[in-house]
Image (cartoon, rainbow, N blue to C red):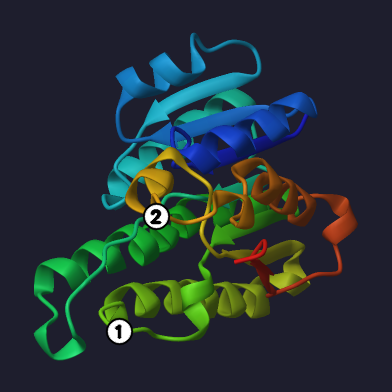
Amino acid sequence: MQTVLITGACGNLGKAVAQMFSSNGWTLVLLDREQAQLNSVFGTDGERQLSLAANLLDAASVQSAVQQALQRFGRIDVLCNLAGGFRMGEPVHETSDGTWDFLMGLNVRSVLHTARAVVPAMLAAGGGRIVNIGAGAAGKGGANMGAYAASKSAVARLTESMSAELRERGINVNCVLPSIIDTPENRKDMPKADPSRWVSPASLAGVIAFLASDAARDIHGASVPVSGLS
């Protein structure tokens, strides 16, 4: 029985990734901020599911959730760092501490906290897989997107560094770089766009599942673009 830990589980991508792994017989550890929302989205926990509320910006909260998962299932084979956020910011010279801290916290610090909590357990078990969520914006900054691009670029660089540190110890670390994901929120915010050109959550979940599989055992430190037609 293999176990996957998914952060941001209640989001559009989180739900698609959870469904993908569940349909393949995996045990799910589902993390999000609110227990009530987890219960509403995923129902009652069972033999192959554990839903845990955790604040990814609080290292102790993450450690506690991971320890509960390890006590329940014994190991975490795959970590999917899906939690993240977007905020259109200001010009770089006007960027507020609030914008910077929000995006660096949600997109970068969350990865640090899960790595601290999960990697030691993976090393003790002899290996694992980690898939981080970056963004196409990681490759190039845009106007009023300096903080967001910097945060997603940091995720890609952390992915490469973790891979260099862990590949010889049985842990594959990679990330995906989606363009616009087809979500209800994005459709509302961009009513004139053609969502058929965007990336569906199910399609992106398939790429994540591949990177988490044994078929991707020779892929290390990759930033995989998933751009649809956009």
> For the residues marked 1 and 2, what is the alpha-carbon distance in whole angstroms?
20 Å
Q: Amino acid at mark 2?
A: Gly
The answer to whether residue 70 of the structure is visible from this angle is no
Where, quadrant-wise, is the N terminus in this rendering? top right
Q: Which residue is depicted at the point 60% across and 48% down? A: 79
Residue underneath mark 1:
143
Answer with the quarter of the image where residue 13 lies: top right
In the rendering, which numbered label is found on residue 117? none
Give the side of residue 136 with respect to residue 192, left or right: right
x and y percentages locating residue 59 in the rendered image: 31, 52
- Disc 2 element: loop
Residue most toward the bottom?
Answer: 93
Residue underneath mark 2:
84
Mark 1 or 2: the one toward you = 1
Q: Earlier in the sequence, mark 1 or mark 2?
A: 2
Q: Which residue is depicted at the point 38% across and 62% down? A: 107
Give the side of residue 188 with respect to residue 140, left or right: left
